[in-house]
Image (cartoon, rainbow, N blue to C red):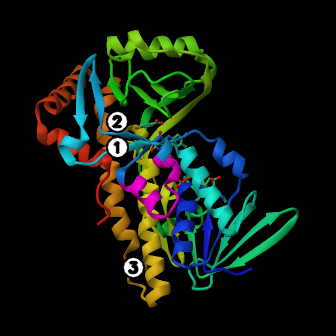
Amino acid sequence: MRTQVAIIGAGPAGLMLGRLLQLAGIEAVILERKSGEYVLSRIRAGVLEQGTADLLRKVNIGARVEAEGLPHDGIEMCFDGDLQRIDFMARVGRRVTVYGQTEMTHDLMEARKASGATTIYEAADVALHDIDSDRPRVTWRKDGVTHTLECDFIAGCDGFHGVSRASVPERSLTLFDRHYPFGWLGILVDQPPVSEELIYAHHERGFALCSMRSMTRSRYYVQVAEGEKIENWSDQRFWDELRRRINPDAAERMKIGPSIEKSIAPLRSFVAEPLRFGSLFLAGDAAHIVPPTGAKGLNLAISDVVMLGDALTEFYGERSKAGLDAYSGKALLRIWKAERFSWWMTSLLHTFPETGAFGRRIQRADFDYLCGSVAAQTSLAENYTGLSLG
Ligand code: FAS
Ligand code: PHB
């Protein structure tokens, strides 16, 4: 089998890259370890930057996000019960769209299926070969047969635990890692959201987030200690803890109900440099991880593949390698700005017992500065709605 670009992973990064290449007339095959149903079963991100929502429309799969996405012009920041709205439209003239990653992945999958492009699901033991040459290959096993795909380039879009970054010799990579001593316990519930906009809350008992998937389905999170077990958290314990941490009137009006999904995600900041090794390019969670506090993970994966898609389009269109040579440096510039913002939001909103009373005063001062400064609110709005790609 031969193609121009082999894409490893059918998450948002791999599927969006496939779409971008297809619209540019470039052939790509996607290899995915899991089934399509499994990929869609993962409950993850919920907020699209303005650029991501615009891109869905640009690549002609914006119908559902238009019809079902919820445009949000701001968020509420809450600190020990005090509220401060950040007005994105007033500060930067941009908004975000609340639209589940699952829905976006579904739209991308459907478009790819309709186009007849090749996606191989349940591809076991995917392995990358000769990635430091201009004739790389990918092998995998399926139905007891080992298959080979020859290609010009490989896009590693296979997430943090994928095979792509692991295929790069350790001496060729520099890894940057920040560990947080807590995780997020999240639930999905078929009840109306407690507020029209998201509420990010800091409380001495820990962080909480009130989000949503639609006007009838809500997504809530509380900070939990590292290593916490999901079986220690009944729904009732979750609701009681969540309502302690947010502003009283929201706690009062919150509609609770049985969780339809409940999971704990660890938090970390991680970047691998560089993002290119020979004919292999890393994008999305394969290259970086951000704590979800800034709603950047999914959006960063998309901005990576927009840059990589442009570089590949330039190569096949003009036989120029300039974009490919510049990809890693250009993507890392935006990645580190998103890492910074996600780290800052996490540092402001979570409890860090090891920083003591002084640390909590600094967090309160950070919040008070935000409340009193248009410049600080503009900075948050600019980062949250998405920095430019240039
Ligand atoms: P993905 O991990 O989504 O996709 C990688 C794909 O590659 C997967 O389908 C995987 O099965 C496949 N794969 C892996 N190894 C392979 C192999 N060897 N061969 C073939 N295929 C392979 N971001 C937010 O913005 N907000 C959130 O609230 C949020 N919550 C999250 C919760 C959890 C539990 C996790 C893990 C992440 C969360 N994220 C969140 C981040 C998340 O949305 C990612 O940023 C986003 O999925 C990145 O997309 P991809 O880079 O495509 O990686
Ligand atoms: C979500 O709705 O899942 C969500 C929203 C905003 C975040 C993280 C998660 O920062």
Residue 346, labelled with which disc?
Answer: 2
> Which residue corresponds to mark 1?
342
Residue 160, labelled with which disc?
Answer: none
- Let me know if residue 185 appears in the view: yes
* Image-based side of 119 in relation to 329, left or right: right
> Which residue corresponds to mark 3?
323
Tell me the amino acid under the disc marked 2.
Thr
Distance between the Cα atoms at labels 2 and 3? 33 Å
Residue depicted at 51% across the width and 69% down the height: 20
Residue depicted at 57% across the width and 24% down the height: 190
Q: Residues within 10 Å of mark 2 (few under 14, many from 20)?
A: many
Q: Report if residue 63 lies within the magenta region.
A: yes
- Tags 1 and 3 touching, CB below 8 Å: no
Q: Earlier in the sequence, mark 2 or mark 3?
A: 3
Distance between the Cα atoms at labels 1 and 2? 6 Å
Q: Tell me the magenta residue range.
A: 51-66
